[in-house]
Image (cartoon, rainbow, N blue to C red):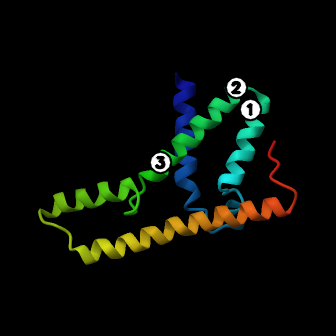
Amino acid sequence: MSTAADNMWRVTSGTIGVFGRIFQAQERKKIHGIVGISTVTQQAFQFGAREALFLVALFSLSLAIINLFPFLPLDGGHIFWSLVEKVRGKRVPFSVMERASAVGFLLVMILFAIGLTNDIHSLSNGGLNLR
C-alpha cells in the first residue's frame, strides 16, 4: 500500500510542480496532447498490461489534479468561488467571476496550445519515441 501512496504522491507533486516550471523550455517539451498520450499508451501496451494500466491510472490521477486547480472552467474553480462566497457571506459579483473565468480559460488554452505544438513538432520529426 505504501508503494501506491508513494506513487500517487509523486504524480500529484509532479503535476502541481510542472506549472511552476512551465516557463522553462525543457519542461514545456514534456507536455503533450492526444498524440503524445496515444504514443506513450501504445508503447506501454507493448511492455505489458500491467504497465498500460499503471499509465492509465497515471493519466487519470493527473487529469483529476488538474481539474481541481482553481480556474473557473474547471471544477476546482467552481469549488473555489463557492468557498469565497461562503467566507464573504454574500455572492461574488458576476463581473469578477467572468474575468476570473476568462483568465482561467486562457491558462487552459495556453496549456492546450503547448501540448498541441509539441505534438505537431513530434509528428514532423518522425514521431514521439519515449523509452
Which of the two discs, 2 and 3, labels the residue nearer the N terminus?
2
Q: Residue at horizontal 53%, vertical 36%? A: 8
Residue assigned mark 3: 65
Residue assigned mark 2: 49
Amino acid carrying mark 3 in the image: Ile
| Residue furthest top as drawn | 1
Q: Label 1: state its secondary structure.
A: helix
Q: Label 2 to label 1, Cα distance in Å?
A: 6 Å
Q: Residue at horizontal 70%, vertical 30%? A: 51
Q: Where is 93 relative to 55, above or below?
A: below
* Spot occupied by residue 69 in the image (x, y as percentages of width and height): 42, 56
The answer to which of 20 and 107 lies nearer the viewer is: 107
Q: Where is 108 relative to 95, above or below?
A: above
Amino acid carrying mark 1 in the image: Phe
Closer to us: mark 3 or mark 1?
1
* Spot occupied by residue 127 in the image (x, y as percentages of width and height): 83, 54
Residue assigned mark 1: 45
Q: Where is 4 relative to 131, above or below?
A: above
